[in-house]
Image (tube, rainbow, N blue to C red):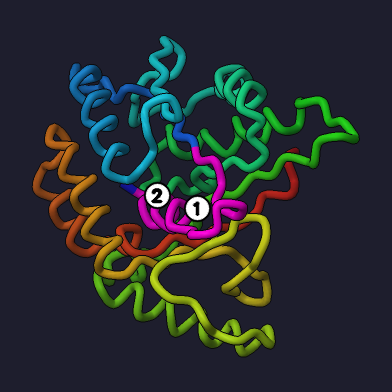
Amino acid sequence: MFFAPTILALLDIEDAHRRPQLYSLCLSVGNADGLGEVRRHELARSLDILGIEDGRRWVVDSPNLQDNFTAQWHPQVISDVLKPYVLEHDIDIILTFDEHGVSSHPNHISLPKGAAHLLRTLPQTSKKRRSRLFSLVTVPLHEKYLGPIAPVSAKLALSIAQLWLGRSSDTEKTDVELGRTPVETRGRVPVPVAVSGWEAYARALSAMMQHRSQLVWFRWLYVSFSRYMWVNEWVEIDNWD
């Protein structure tokens, strides 16, 4: 629902040496309405469309991580669930929500705290580069529902940022390199950004259509106007304390 521009941008990188191994880990089946198994299968169909194949995606169903709009999850519980996936697949960059969770959902808000707790406690070796954590920027309300204006605004910001940083603007379609090339600024802090064109938006829309059990009326407004169907901005969390 929120990360499609980034998923599509990363998997669209043509150079195989630069294209990352991308994984998806969902920490809840979304069983608040008793539809957990339905939503598990909906997510699988959605990720098929976005390009994350079976074997690189997992859904956790833990009694301590149940879908709940009134409670935050404990950082230690999140860390314990994440750890085996991160270690087994040698994951060195984690993407998640920021402290506002985009929609203020307390489960979303819990995730960066849990991921930070994990990275703080992971053993670091000289042979492995330091793991990194990025969070999806929650934009102000007046920026959230710009619809097709969002990518135009973001591309303009990109052009200005590239001029500011002394770079040439040669990007087409969608592109982002997390942890490598800062391409936009909020203030003077460079941040990675993924901006979708119409083709990527159409794929994101098709993926969202797989979540039939969640397509209540206000989510139709979301898929029509949400900035997150078009644009993702990221900031790195350096302080894990």
For numbered disc 2, what is the local secondary structure? Answer: loop
Q: Residue at x 68, y 87 (%)?
A: 166
Counting other residues with Cα less than 10 Å from the Cα at mark 2, is it few (<14), some (14-19), or many (20 or more)? some
Residue 35 appears left or right of 192: left
For residue 3, the mark is 2
For numbered disc 1, what is the local secondary structure? Answer: strand
| Secondary structure mostly seen in the magenta stretch | loop
Residue that protrudes farthest toward the top in the picture: 63
Residue that protrudes farthest toward the left in the picture: 217
Viewport quadrant of the C terminus: top right
Residue 205 appears left or right of 67: left
Give, as a three-letter code, the residue at label 2: Phe
Residue 111 appears left or right of 90: left
For residue 9, the mark is none
On whether residue 10 falls in the magenta region, the answer is yes
Residue named by callout 1 = 136
Snapshot quadrant of residue 70: top left
Give, as a three-letter code, the residue at label 1: Leu
**Which span of residues is magenta-colored?**
2-22
Q: Residue at x 18, y 22 (%)?
A: 38
